[in-house]
Amino acid sequence: MAGREANAETRARFPIPTPFGAFMTRIPVTILGATGVVGQRFVRRLADHPLFEIRHLAASERSTGKRYQAACAWRLGGDPYGNLGNRVLVAGHPDTAFAPIVFSALDTEPAKVLEPAFAKAGALVFSNASAFRMAEDVPLLIPEVNPDHLGLLTVQRTKRGWKGGIVCNPNCTGTMLALALAPLHKAFGVEAVFMASLQAVSGAGYPGVPSLDILGNVVPFIRNEEPKVEEELPKLLGAFRKDAIQPAAFGISALCHRVPVIEGHTEAVSVRLKGNPSPDAVREAFATWKPEPRLPSSPEAIIRLHAEEDRPQPRLDVDADGGLSIHIGRIRPCPLLGIKFTLLGHNTERGAAAASLLNAELAVAEGLL
């Protein structure tokens, strides 16, 4: 479920609850890179959001001044263009597209220039780009995993002299892995991780991977993917100490592969945990993990556990909960590290636009707007 159906369910479960009740009208937002597929996902999720209202759709110079439907080939299901097809696209600059909250679907190079410009102007920028993820004063955020890392915004504003700020969500592959490891790190402590991914072609952006490269094939290389996972995970699971993040002290090795699946990254995970807990104890840690806070877009269950020996599968499971939950199955002993399991998550929903949206909801809940 995505778009209007998901937002209708959100409204039913969260009719602008405390601490959001102070906002009698929706908060204006800007989407940078609105014509791309990630930008379209922002539009679809924000079209009827209970807290946010799209004020500006921003795009590159070649699209500025055009109507959204003329400049953008809509690639998603649901209402085309979020019923904003006649909205005129504006330049992605604070002078023409300022709003208190900015969602960035930009590529890395333009993000390096435009995201700081909006932050300096006073906007809170929620970025899906990799440009600032590993900056020491930028929160790399997953609300269920490390909500206290939002405290870095105070450091960032002081250090850079910004009225606003930048908050990043992680790489999609790392997002799924961090969500799976967070309850284990809390319950036992993670000592080492090995992960081999089987990643959907949609992760390469539209139109993805050329058909003659991927059909009937596995590509054992995704540029920069393995370093991103290995660098970002210790920051994500690290501790916020004295205005800085102390990275989690465990080793991680990632192997990333592109496979002929449209949506959904599957990960084969082996992990060494303190105390060498049993598979049943690990399953219990997953089942009882109830992270806070609950946000307007939070799925009913963050982790969906599967007992069948052949699950999870992208075709059967990835769209559950609007793509916002992760799926774990085949929890069993690992002869090398202790525990192994299969993990699945929606790379273009939980791993992209929806991740930034959840981060923005958390910032509003924490009074940081």
Image (cartoon, grey):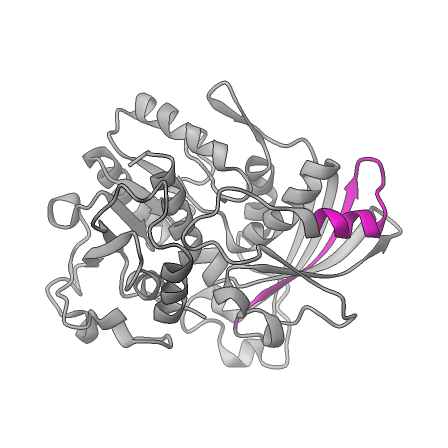
Residue 213 place in picture, x, y as percent:
55, 76
Disc tally is 0
Q: Residue at point 29% right, 51% down?
A: 51
The N terminus lies in quadrant: bottom left
Residue 335 place in picture, x, y as percent:
89, 51
Q: Residue at point 69% right, 46% down?
A: 253
The image quarter in which residue 369 lies: top left
**Would you say residue 254 sits in the magenta stretch?**
no
Please say if 233 is above or below 202. above
Residue 291 place in picture, x, y as percent:
57, 44
Please say if 158 is above or below 330. above
The image quarter in which residue 342 lies: bottom right
Q: Residue at point 45% right, 40% down?
A: 133
Horizontally, residue 324 falls left or right of residue 360, namely: right
Q: Judge whether residue 251 can be spotted in this image.
A: no
Residue 118 place in picture, x, y as percent:
23, 41
Q: Provide the residue span drawn in magenta.
A: 263-286
Residue found at the far right of this picture = 335
Return the residue nearer the eye: 307 or 166: 307
Q: Judge whether residue 242 can be spotted in this image.
A: yes
**Would you say residue 274 sits in the magenta stretch?**
yes
Please say if 93 is above or below 42. above
Horizontally, residue 329 falls left or right of residue 57, namely: right
Return the residue nearer the eye: 213 or 137: 137
Please say if 200 is above or below 179. below
Q: Residue at point 67% right, 31% down?
A: 249
The image quarter in which residue 74 lies: bottom left
